[in-house]
Image (cartoon, rainbow, N blue to C red):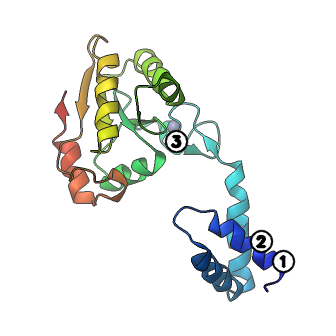
């Protein structure tokens, strides 16, 4: 039997994706062996997560109302890159070739059910494109069945907006591969060779 607080932590870690009970035990034991300063920092950072929120404009992870990218006035406002989740932004930013803004959908459409559609930030996207007079929307959905379905749906919603170009990342990435895990070179190529759809 472990002490109560130890058991509780194991339960916390077990609730994380891809962490089973055995791995959780190992992680908690590892933390137990850390020095006090490192532990303190870990605990502080963990507790600060609850202060984070979604950017009011693009729905990226943010410390205040607006995220660092939306606050950055040197970003080019004419392009909007639509991604499934905030981790995709991190991957695209690593390529350093994209200077525009982002819009986080919060997932993909898994079926044509109206409920799922309303959970995604689609109406917010359409409003932004019109309010901000966006010139190009880059659909950076993952090359999966759901990603394709979502890109097609967005294309239909966006196609009637005058003067707007809608592009999608080139098929450099393997089908089923995630943007989140793509290497910088592959992702740079997919961005540079994006095609109008
Ligand atoms: Zn933002």
Q: Is residue 196 left or right of residue 52?
A: left
Q: What residue does disc 3 label?
A: 60
Specify few, some or many for label 1: CA neighbours under 10 Å numbering under 14, 14-19, or 20 or more: few
Secondary structure of residue under mark 2: helix
Identify residue for label 2.
8
Q: Which quarter of the figure has residue 134?
A: top left
Category of crowding for the residue at label 2, using alpha-carbon neighbours closer than 10 angstroms: few (below 14), some (14–19), many (at least 20): few
Query: Please, is residue 18 above or below residue 1 in the view?
Result: above
Contact, CB < 8 Å: mark 1 with mark 2? yes
Q: Split into 4 quadrants, where in the image is the N terminus?
A: bottom right
Can you tell me whether the CB of the residue at mark 3 lies under 8 Å from the nearest atom of ligand 1? yes
Q: Give the residue at x 20% y 53%.
A: 174
Can you give x and y, in whole percent of width and height, for residue 45 in the image? 68, 64
Give residue 4's mark: 1
Q: Residues within 10 Å of mark 3 (few under 14, many from 20)?
A: many
Q: Is residue 135 visible in this depiction of the protein?
A: yes
Say how many tags the image has: 3
Q: x%, y% of residue 92?
A: 34, 49
**First along the sequence among labels 1 and 3:** 1
- Depicted 139 relative to depicted 48: above or below: above
Distance from label 3 to label 2 (Cα)?
31 Å
Query: Can you give x and y, in whole percent of width and height, for residue 152 in the image?
Result: 28, 27
Q: Nearer the viewer, residue 167 or 12?
A: 12
Q: Report, in whole angstroms, how far the alpha carbon at label 1 lies from the one at label 3.
A: 37 Å
Which image quarter is the C terminus in?
top left
């Amino acid at each position: 039997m472990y002490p109560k607080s130890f058991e509780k932590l194991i339960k916390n870690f077990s609730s994380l994706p891809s962490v089973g009970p055995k791995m959780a035990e190992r992680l908690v034991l590892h933390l137990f062996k850390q020095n006090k300063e490192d532990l303190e920092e870990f605990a502080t950072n963990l507790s600060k997560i609850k202060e984070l929120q979604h950017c009011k404009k693009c729905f990226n992870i943010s410390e205040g109302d607006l995220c660092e990218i939306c606050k950055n006035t040197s970003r080019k406002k004419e392009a909007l890159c639509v991604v499934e989740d905030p981790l995709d932004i991190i991957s695209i930013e690593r390529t350093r070739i994209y200077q525009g803004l982002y819009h986080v959908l919060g997932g993909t459409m898994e079926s044509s059910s109206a409920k799922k559609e309303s959970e995604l930030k689609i109406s917010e996207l359409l409003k932004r494109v019109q309010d901000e007079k966006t010139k190009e929307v880059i659909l950076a959905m993952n090359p999966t069945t759901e990603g394709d379905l979502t890109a097609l749906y967005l294309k239909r919603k966006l196609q009637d907006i005058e003067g707007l170009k809608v592009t999608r990342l080139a098929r450099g990435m393997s089908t089923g591969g995630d943007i989140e895990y793509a290497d910088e070179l592959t992702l740079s190529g997919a961005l540079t060779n994006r095609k109008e759809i």
